[in-house]
Amino acid sequence: MTTQTTISTSRLVIIPTYNEIENIERMLEKVLSLSPEFDILIVDDGSPDGTASIVKQKIEQLPKRIHLIERSGKLGLGTAYIAGFEWALKNNYDHIFEMDCDFSHNPDDLIRLDAQLLEGSDLAVGSRYVRGGKLKNWPLSRILISFGASVYVRLITFMPVKDPTAGFVAYKKEVLSAIDFKKIKFIGYAFQIEMKFATYLLGFKIKEIPILFSDREEGVSKMSGGIVREAVMGVLQMRFWAFSNSYSR
């Protein structure tokens, strides 16, 4: 008689927040409703609107599924995700996801990203710029900036990722375990590019899947000119830095 062993995969969705009171409760409820199960880690940067208070109320109801890291102020998107990555690795999650709280990323697509990891990819990217990917409610100027940035990144880094600035991604724990977070230099828009670049340079398999990216439904956009400038200059720095350094631990 042959005994079959079922390997359970644990999943964690990391969501950074700052003033997301309009979205947080609905986002938590949506992600928790998905199958397979996804746990949630909120990394809140001292939201003055009470976002963290809503999360704490939900934690009382589901303490094993919802988790919260509270920080003292706006310390940057990259540092929020790195805090989340370190927490995920410490708690031995197998698949670790990044997404926004504003519903510009469709939570249902977490299932598709997860499936891509199960099929053998190490990093799955929810992409606006592969065949089938779409943008909704974006002004032409923003589309041109975003698409132009993706082309620019590919030209400078030679990285075969059509949406390198995408913030809706899924990592296997082996990828995050291999990257030395102290060597990630950027905390804003360029952070997403650098994490993909590090994954690429370390030889992991990256796969993009098409998503519909919608402009936020509630709240205020966090995009700024400074974030875009960091990305433009950061890509050059990344490329030259990579000649003499490695992102590995």
Image (cartoon, rainbow, N blue to C red):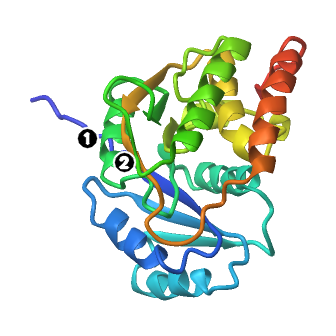
| Label 2 SS | helix
Q: Amino acid at mark 2?
A: Leu
Q: Nearer the viewer, residue 80 or 117?
A: 80
Q: Amino acid at mark 1?
A: Thr
User: On the picture, is 232 further left or further right than 147?
Assistant: right
| Label 1 SS | loop
Q: Nearer the viewer, residue 55 or 4?
A: 55
Q: Quadrant of the C terminus?
A: top right
Residue 204: image location, x then y, percent: 56, 20
Q: Quadrant of the N terminus?
A: top left
Q: Badge 1, how many Cα within 10 Å: few under 14, some, many 20+? A: few
Figure quadrant of residue 202 = top right
- Residue at (17, 34) in percent of width and height: 3
User: On the picture, is 132 further left or further right than 192?
Assistant: left
- Residue at (78, 67) in percent of width and height: 74
Q: Nearer the viewer, residue 92 or 76?
A: 76
The answer to whether 79 is drawn above or below residue 22 in the figure is above
Instruction: Please state which of the two labelled residues, at mark 1 or mark 2, is closer to the viewer.
Output: 2
Determine which residue is flagged by label 1. 6
Determine which residue is flagged by label 2. 110
Residue 98: image location, x then y, percent: 53, 49
Figure quadrant of residue 115 = top left
- Residue at (80, 75) in percent of width and height: 72
Q: How many marks?
A: 2
Residue 58: image location, x then y, percent: 45, 83
Residue 181 appears in view: no
1 or 2: tag closer to the N-terminus: 1
User: On the picture, is 243 further left or further right than 152?
Assistant: right
- Residue at (87, 25) in percent of width and height: 237
